[in-house]
Structures are given as structure tokens and as C-alpha cells.
């Protein structure tokens, strides 16, 4: 498979990076800020399941807890497509950067790709608001 286009989306969060990581890496919190998983995740063995609406049930497998802020996850679609989402929380002074790499999938138009990146920015902005306003931590 050839390499695909990517856009790096990030926001600065004025909270200690470990606090941001602990909240963002918890799949049970994702329905609060990750609108693509807005219906929530249900644990099943070593992965999580999400209702993908018309796509069917989506399986999500997360990187194990770690000291590096890595929240990478593989989204497995019913079609057999597996999407690796690279997501990091890294220190930035007394705060943190939430960094997500949006990948342009096969057959995705430029407009869809831009919309996907805008959607991720909206989600990361929601994460920032929740943590900085003290709604989730």
C-alpha cells in the first residue's frame, strides 16, 4: 500500500501532561469529547466496541498504558479496513500538547480529508475545554 497523505492536528492544553494523558487515554471518557465515539465504547476482552451507525460495529484496540503519552489506536471497520490513529499527549512546559495525525484514507476526497481534520480539531478542542474548565478531571 502506498503512503497516504496526513495532517497533524494539535491543541495546547493548560494542564499537566500526565493529567491530560490519564483522562484522554481512558476509553470510558472518550464519549465526553471524541464525537466519533459519541455513543461510547463497550469493553470486550482486550479491545473496545463502538456503534458505527450505518457502518455497523467498530472495534477499537488501544496501545497499552505507557509513560510516553501514546494513545494510538487501531479502528477496525466491518469492511475489514483497519485505520491506525496516531495520538499523543506530550509535555509542553507546565501544560500539554494533544497531537493527532489524521490520515487520508483510500478513496477519500480532498474535501472529506479536510472535513475529517476539522472534526478532529473540534474533538481536541472539546478535550481542552473539558480539562481546562475542570469538567472531566
Image: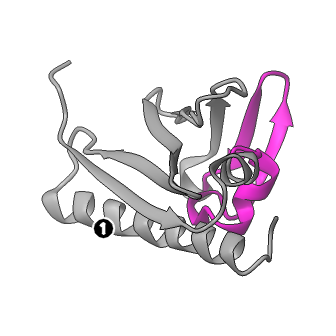
Relative image position of residue 109 (x, y in whole percent)? 17, 56
Q: Nearer the viewer, residue 90 or 3?
A: 90
Q: Quadrant of the C terminus?
A: bottom right
Relative image position of residue 104 (x, y in whole percent)? 25, 45
Q: Nearer the viewer, residue 130 or 97?
A: 97
The residue located at (66%, 28%) in the rendering is 67
Residue placed under numbered mark 1 in the picture: 115
Which quadrant of the figure has residue 5? top left
The residue located at (56%, 33%) in the rendering is 70
The residue located at (23%, 38%) in the rendering is 106
Q: Is residue 112 left or right of residue 89?
A: left
Which quadrant of the figure has residue 114? bottom left
The residue located at (39%, 58%) in the rendering is 10
- Classify 95 as above or below 70: below
Relative image position of residue 66 (x, y in whole percent)? 68, 26
Which region of the structure is painted magenta?
25-52
Relative image position of residue 68 (x, y in whole percent)? 59, 30
Residue sticking out furthest to the bottom: 133
Q: Nearer the viewer, residue 6 or 79?
A: 6
Q: Is residue 117 left or right of residue 110?
A: right
Q: Quadrant of the N terminus?
A: top left
Amino acid at each position: 500500500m502506498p503512503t497516504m497523505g496526513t495532517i497533524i492536528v494539535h491543541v495546547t492544553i493548560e494542564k499537566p501532561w500526565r493529567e491530560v494523558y490519564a483522562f484522554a487515554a481512558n476509553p470510558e471518557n472518550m464519549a465526553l469529547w471524541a464525537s466519533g465515539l459519541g455513543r461510547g465504547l463497550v469493553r470486550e476482552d482486550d479491545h473496545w466496541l463502538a456503534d458505527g451507525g450505518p457502518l455497523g460495529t467498530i472495534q477499537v484496540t488501544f496501545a497499552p498504558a505507557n509513560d510516553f503519552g501514546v494513545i494510538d489506536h487501531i479502528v477496525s471497520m466491518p469492511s475489514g479496513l483497519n485505520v491506525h490513529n496516531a495520538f499523543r499527549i506530550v509535555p509542553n512546559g507546565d501544560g500539554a500538547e494533544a497531537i493527532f495525525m489524521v490520515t487520508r484514507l483510500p478513496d477519500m476526497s480532498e474535501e472529506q480529508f479536510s472535513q475529517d481534520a476539522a472534526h478532529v480539531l473540534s474533538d481536541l478542542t472539546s478535550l481542552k475545554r473539558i480539562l481546562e474548565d475542570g469538567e472531566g478531571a
